[in-house]
Image: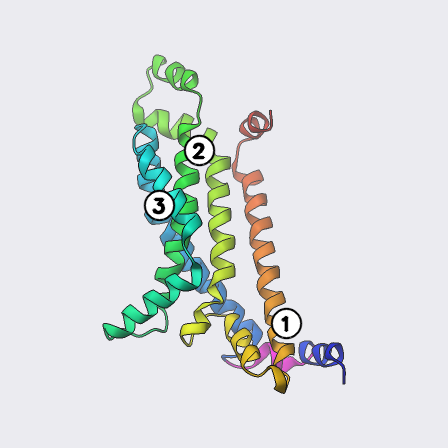
Amino acid sequence: MSFWDRFVEWATTAETWTAPGDGLLALLAEHLRLAGVALLLSALIALPPAVWLAHRRRGRVVATVVANAGRAIPSLGILVLVAVLAIEQGFSTRFWPLIVALVVLGVPPIFTNAYTAITAVDPMVLEAARAQGRTERQVLREVELPLGLPLLIDGLRLAAVQIVATTALGAVVGPTGGLGRPIVRGFASLRGGGDVELVGASILVALLSLLVDRGTTLLTRVVVPPGVRRLQAG
């Protein structure tokens, strides 16, 4: 039987999708849950200081360091390091080591884009808002955040795609990792038919990353005011 025949048989078998705890639907739900928690924590950690520093026009060095760190961090290296430290401290490697590693990856693009989004607002616009009697809080809420929203959401998009794609690596060092589990199993049993499971799960991770990318792009069109979109396009 050829690879594609085996692949079609595997993909069209109900057990492949619905097996309790290990079917693709259950693994997809686990993958999304892990990635969602990591993205939420990354946003909570990165957005407040980035927005505050940018509004105050401070922390340019911090933003540069965070941006460079985001480009230099090796995903698997961080994950292995956190898992080893967790084991040495007696913690379970099931959940939090992966979340910590994903947050470390998610914070830099969110912080950098949020900082850039606020500092990129035209100073003349800010001065006009202050001249009309707006407080600093109103300037941030009514001027800087709406104008910087497209770039801010783009940072969330970058972080979300990276987190979704990297979540699968959790299965390398522990019993979690969502769709990474069949990928790891497939690598371990390539000669025994694992290539089908490996390819199938890899395709699902790629499709999920594309859907997240497109979803955040659509989110930008929904939440960003049309006038701001036209201004950004111009």
Judge left or right: residue 180 versus residue 83.
right
Q: CA distance from mark 2 to mark 1?
A: 39 Å
Amino acid type, residue under disc 3 in the picture: Ala
Upstream in the sequence, badge 3 or badge 1? 3
**Nearer to me, 175 or 189:** 189
Amino acid type, residue under disc 1 in the picture: Val
Q: Decide: few, some or many residues near mark 2? Use Cα within 10 Å; few <14, some 14-19, many ≥20.
A: many
Upstream in the sequence, badge 3 or badge 2? 3
143 over 90 or under it: above or below: above
Which segment did they paint magenta? 12-20
Q: CA distance from mark 3 to mark 2?
A: 13 Å
Give the secondary structure at mark 1. Answer: helix
Upstream in the sequence, badge 2 or badge 1? 2
Percent position of residue 134, x then y: 33, 19
User: Which of labels 2 and 1 is toward the front?
Assistant: 1
**Nearer to me, 230 or 65:** 65
Q: Which mark is residue 4?
A: none
- Using the rendered image of the protein, determine whether residue 96 is visible from the camera's viewpoint: no
Image quadrant where one finds the C terminus: top right
**Nearer to me, 110 or 16:** 110
Give the secondary structure at mark 2. Answer: helix
* Callout 2 touching callout 1 (CB < 8 Å): no
133 over 25 or under it: above or below: above
* Residue carrying label 2: 117
* Residue carrying label 3: 46
202 over 128 or under it: above or below: below
Q: How is the image coloured?
A: rainbow
95 over 50 or under it: above or below: below
* Residue carrying label 1: 199
Amino acid type, residue under disc 2 in the picture: Ala
